[in-house]
Image (cartoon, grey):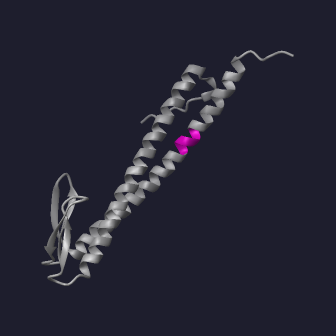
Amino acid sequence: MASPQRIELDKLSVEQLKAVKEQTDLEVNLLQDSLTKIRSAATRLESASAALHDLSLRPHGKKMLVPLTASLYVPGTLDDSEKVLVDVGTGYFIEKTMTQGKEYCERKINLLKSNFDELVEMATKKKTIADEMGVLLQAKLRQSSPSPSS
């Protein structure tokens, strides 16, 4: 398998350097969007985990409001707090015990945090590369523009 070639940035033309910088900036923005989405998903899972903990403390037969949407609730009665439905994505739900539901949330949170850390590292490297290209591009532009004579 061939190893990726290292591009010598100082040998690129101004136009090529601009194109590479734009591509790198785009990649940084996409990574930052991914980081935001991962952070949001982890927050939702942490909220679900807290809700499971709160639910486990409630007694059988407890009256409560059940959310149908973010702003619509209906009255309900807690029948069995030991069984929960876990949303595993794309409209699929799996019945699990309370303990299994908490473990599922924790596994997902840990996975997201691991992915988040990897993406932060990658985004930092890409941002450094983009910044270096910006400095090099400015230097090349200054070189190519005529200097004012005194």
Magenta run includes residue 31:
no
Q: Is residue 9 above or below residue 44?
A: above
Q: Quick check: 41 left or right of 2?
A: left
Q: Is residue 31 above or below residue 113?
A: above
Residue that extends furthest to the right in the rendered view of this protein: 150
Task: Give the residue displayed 67% in from the left and 23% down from the top.
Answer: 140
Task: Give the residue displayed 54% in from the left and 44% down from the top.
Answer: 125
Q: Magenta stretch: give its range.
A: 125-129
> Residue 94 location, x and y as percent?
16, 64
Is 128 in front, or is 90?
90
Is 96 in front, or is 74?
74
Q: In this view, does 125 lie above or below 38?
A: above
Image quadrant containing the N terminus: top left
Give the quadrant of residue 49.
Answer: bottom left
Task: Give the residue displayed 24% in from the left and 79% down from the top.
Answer: 56
> Residue 83 location, x and y as percent?
16, 74
Q: Quick check: 52 left or right of 146?
A: left
Image quadrant containing the C terminus: top right
> Residue 57 location, x and y as percent?
26, 82
Magenta run includes residue 126:
yes
Is 118 in front, or is 150?
150
Q: Quick check: 147 left or right of 43?
A: right
Residue 2 in view: yes
> Residue 102 location, x and y as percent?
28, 72
